[in-house]
Amino acid sequence: MELLSPAGSAEGVSAAVQSGADAVYLSFATLSERKKFDLTEDELGRAVQFAHVRGVKIYVKLDYFCRDADLPLAVENARRASRMGADAVIAEDLGLIWALRRAVPSMPIHAGEALGIHDLDGVRLCAAMGVSRVALPRELPKKELETLVKGSPIETEICAHGPLCAAFKGQCMLPALHDALPGPCEGWCLRGFKAGIRERHPVAMKDLCLISQAEFLTGLGVTALRIDGRERRPEYCAAVTGVWSRAIGTLRTPSEEDMELLRGAFPAAGFTDAYLTGAQAESMLGMPSPEPEEDTPFYAAVRKNYLNHEFQRVPVTFDITVNLEEPVKLTAADDRGNFASGEGGAPELAFHTETTQAMLQTELYKTGGTPFRFAGLTAHIQKGVYLDPKVLAPIRDKLLQELLEKRVTLETRAEGVVPSLPPSPGHSGPPILTVAVQKCSQLSSRLLSLAPPVLYLPLEEAVSGDKRLEPFLDDKNITVCATLPEYIYASELPEVAQLLFKARQLGIKDLAVSNIGHIVFVRRLGFNVRGDTAMNVRNSNTLDVLARLRLGSAALAMDLSSFQVRSMEKPMDTELVIYGRLPLMRTAACLIRARSGVCSCDSALGFPDSSGFINPVTRSFGCRNTLWSAQKLHLIKRSREYLTAGLWGVRLSFTTENADECAKITERYLELGTYEPSSTTQGKF
């Protein structure tokens, strides 16, 4: 099983490699667009060489999600990484994966955790797209994880240690409030929410630590265990990697000394394995202390170890021939088939001590200061001769140096051309106005009279039997589209299947999905499939992929600018949210229950931000939550731009609005009223 460690600097690479990592993931960029934890191109080249001679792989992590303008640079960075010998790229954007498969066809692609693959249909779809490994969500409990790992046709990876976010990976849009793409976590959720007078961090969590489950994980068959924390100090990486390397190697319960190392690596609020083991959500909460910027005795000791120590992981075997009055012949071979030969001083007739294999092996075993570890000796020794073992030291050292130089190899990979998408301007006429609600209580006869062509509502609400929905179902001019949860675990499929059966009985034929793994599942049951906003559609290539998967429509991400929306190729019906709250975080655990011990998320108000505005919390399937922005997107003054953007539909997304407000706002966008909602923003549009 591979131990995968993070590196946010050149020193971080050394810290990971010399502490026992089998692979290191990092990001790099040119100096003109380098971010805080990126390596330069030169640093990447040196990192690959440093790691490869020591038998360690380098994976290059690309941007989480790409807009059209970002794709060429991401593809070019992948090409450069391939030329420099990186072993794989990590991508989490459907459109980027589509482009990479053509740009670097022989480069392994790993699907990152933010892609949200949590079921076998999603894993199989990734495999069909040419992905060789998929990172599974850290929120999966044991049984779900076992099902996925055992049924996966490709490699699997899970996060075993590191910072834990309340949101599903890829489902946090807090960076969008700060003019940033979703990407490396910068702790926006720790900077201004408050649950009460004394508590300012209601979504802060402890660090994930599955070290007590090392034996289970090793026996599970997962390909790789990943340590997260690329933004943390190299000393953190070294300490945590060292402990995990020993745990995997021995399968023993970590000692108290090891736990002290983990606790000293970062001032976390504590550790949790609650998702894997099914513990209560309250056990996951905790606010970390700031990481010390200055040096500490702990960091100094850890740094001294990895800067002055070689982790000996590369096996080397020797073959020696010792004959009287002939130079000793020594050959060394590594695990890649490289070998080096040399010879030295001649043996003498033995008077008191005759040379044995054990005597020679003792000297050849001394490979300290190199990445090599002694793995065996084949000896051909003439009877009655003596060779001073110290004669072998300079020959041994020379051969090991030759092997090191031969291990610096660069694999040449073919490169391809990413085809340009054909011009697809989308619809020429004005888009239809669609409506999404969270509850049937938001429906009214007034809204019905406005006849929205498409009405979206959660699947549970669609089959709740609420009489207010019936006239919408009966209206032939209105398509009622049920929305599926963002995550559906295997254990939840029977319940979801029952809800879908009820939906079919009600005449619902359209379903909006937020995860590519649900496409096959829904189509298998005979529904028309649409893509919802949580699909993270931010570029034309992603739309092209969804069009190839025969989705009826796709909603764009809510953090795109007007120019980005208008300039995208639209090979399928494309929809944009023009009114509504931004879904800041979609969580696996109930945030309200986690704070109070009682689930009241159906009636909870939410969390105030630092300005006193309320960020509402709503319940979704499985007692998961969505945390919404305090301000509502309101683009009525930009109507000329979105009406001429080639869109099939524009959506009004209602969350906490009552039925009267829903109707008034719909009338406003149909130019039938003058109602203006309060606390609004134009977002990034």
Image (spheres, rainbow, N blue to C red):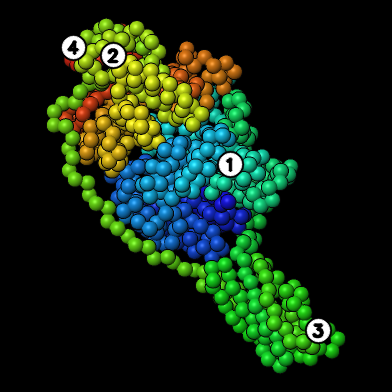
Mark 2 or mark 1, which is nearer to you? 2
Residue of label 4: 672
380 up-or-down from 251: above or below: below
Residue of label 3: 354
Q: Is residue 310 visible?
A: no
Name the secondary structure under disc 2. helix
| Residue pictured at 36% horizontal, 28% vertical | 525
| Residue pictured at 41% horizontal, 39% vertical | 122
Label 4 neighbour load within 10 Å: few <14, some 14-19, many 20+:
few
Residue of label 2: 473
119 up-or-down from 406: above or below: above
Q: At label 1, which amino acid type do we have?
A: His
Distance between the Cα atoms at labels 4 and 3?
105 Å
Mark 4 / mark 2, whichever is N-terminal: 2
Residue of label 1: 161
Mark 2 / mark 3, whichever is N-terminal: 3
Q: At label 4, which amino acid type do we have?
A: Leu
Label 2 neighbour load within 10 Å: few <14, some 14-19, many 20+:
some
| Residue pictured at 51% horizontal, 45% vertical | 157
